[in-house]
Image (spheres, rainbow, N blue to C red):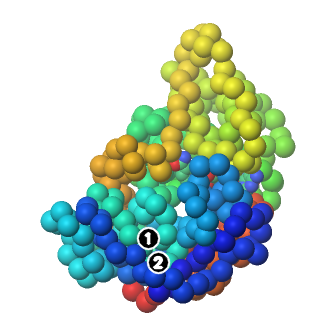
Amino acid sequence: MRALVMTAPSEGPDRTEVREVEAPRPGPGEVTIDVTHAGINFIDVMARRGDAGYVPAWPYTPGKEVAGTVREVGDGVPDLVVGRRVAAFAREAGGLAEVVRAPAALTVPIPAAVPSATAAATPLMLATALLLLTDAARFSPGETVLVHSASGGVGGAVARLVPALGGGRLIGTVGHADKIPAARQSGYDVVVSRDDDLAEAIRADGGQVDVVLDPLGTAMLETDLTVTAPGGRIVLFGNAGGGRSAGLPEPRRLIGGNVAVAGFSISSLAVTAPERVARALRRLLDLIADGRLTFPVTEVGSLAEVPEIHQLLAERRGDGKYVVRVAES
Ligand SMILES: NC(=O)c1ccc[n+]([C@@H]2O[C@H](COP(=O)([O-])OP(=O)(O)OC[C@H]3O[C@@H](n4cnc5c(N)ncnc54)[C@H](OP(=O)(O)O)[C@@H]3O)[C@@H](O)[C@H]2O)c1
């Protein structure tokens, strides 16, 4: 089978290539999937540049979210049959390939009304956005949500999910003013370039926010604390810059501010509580099937084109969500 292979750490696309490799077989509790579509994610870029904890060994095939059909079923998997159209979180990556192995516990049937290209964006990106809002931030309808890097994939997914979860006010930040229109188009009420005074913009918009979703390490944490209302929740879920994070605030800052700082990682949750990821995945596919959630994706034609999309993401030039068509569905 053909797979996208990263041969060694690199800041560029030079060490990523499509190679012929042996197809995986399922172990107990696993399935293999003939992949038709796979999500392309920033986490692939973090792996490519060699951030600690992402690549167990080189060469490495990235790709944690796929849609396709069940190819083979391992022992102890009673409820999935060969040929069934499924979406899966590929816990050990390998999804940017013609065949991937995934835990059955993280593999969910796709309703007929959901296109495979959209389904391929659910296991990691949309599930992250949903779990950030519901599990990590305990979002309630009517609350104000601040999201950093609002024009990216997760940022766009949060904007589309908040209305489906009962609605709320959405404030986004972007790294450069030219990303403001993209964030506004996905549903943000207010978008602020981080070159501008965010605290002042939030004061002008009504004062404070209830939830902050922050993938920027601790770079914005001081501002997050300044703009969060009593009872607010700040969720740290990434370190896009890849540098060393500063420490967390003094406890008295959190106690006095009546704010919580939480963390979220879907990759960890897929190991420690896979049923929560699978539940999110089912809920998302149902929301899409019922027409209560729409999520546009940009479809890329082949695995060979993925390295240039990775580079686009690495250079912060991405716009929304990218999915690659690996085979005809
Ligand atoms: N914890 C989890 O489970 C989880 C799951 C999925 C994603 N994430 C994280 O969430 C973040 C967004 O993911 P995504 O899939 O939405 O990615 P994306 O579409 O590629 O967007 C990434 C955005 O991060 C911002 N950024 C800040 N510093 C950057 C840097 N040094 N290099 C590149 N981009 C930088 C850029 O937006 P601005 O210029 O507008 O800031 C960029 O557009 C990433 O940090 C990712 O690792 C975490």
Front residue of 2 and 118:
2
Inspect this view and state whether residue 144 appears. Answer: no
Instruction: Return the residue at label 1.
Output: 66
Residue 308 visible in the shown view: yes
Q: Circle 2 is placed at which residue position?
A: 37
As displayed, is residue 290 above or below residue 306? above
Residue at figure coordinates x 53%, y 24% from the top left: 260
Q: Nearer the viewer, residue 74 or 191?
A: 74
The percent position of residue 302, horizontal first and vertical second, equals 58, 85
Q: Amino acid at mark 2?
A: His
Q: CA distance from mark 2 to mark 1?
A: 6 Å
Residue 29 placement, left or right of 189 = left
The yes-or-no answer for disc 2 within 8 Å of ligand 1 is: no
Please, is residue 139 above or below residue 54 in the view?
Answer: above
Picture quarter containing residue 253?
A: top right
Q: Are marks 2 and 1 in contact (CB under 8 Å)?
A: yes
Residue at (37% x, 43% y) in the render: 272
Residue at screen point 51% across, 40% down:
264
Question: 322 or 306, which is in the foreground?
Answer: 306
Q: Answer few, some or many: residues within 10 Å of disc 2's Cα (few below 14, many 20 plus, some between 14 and 19).
A: many
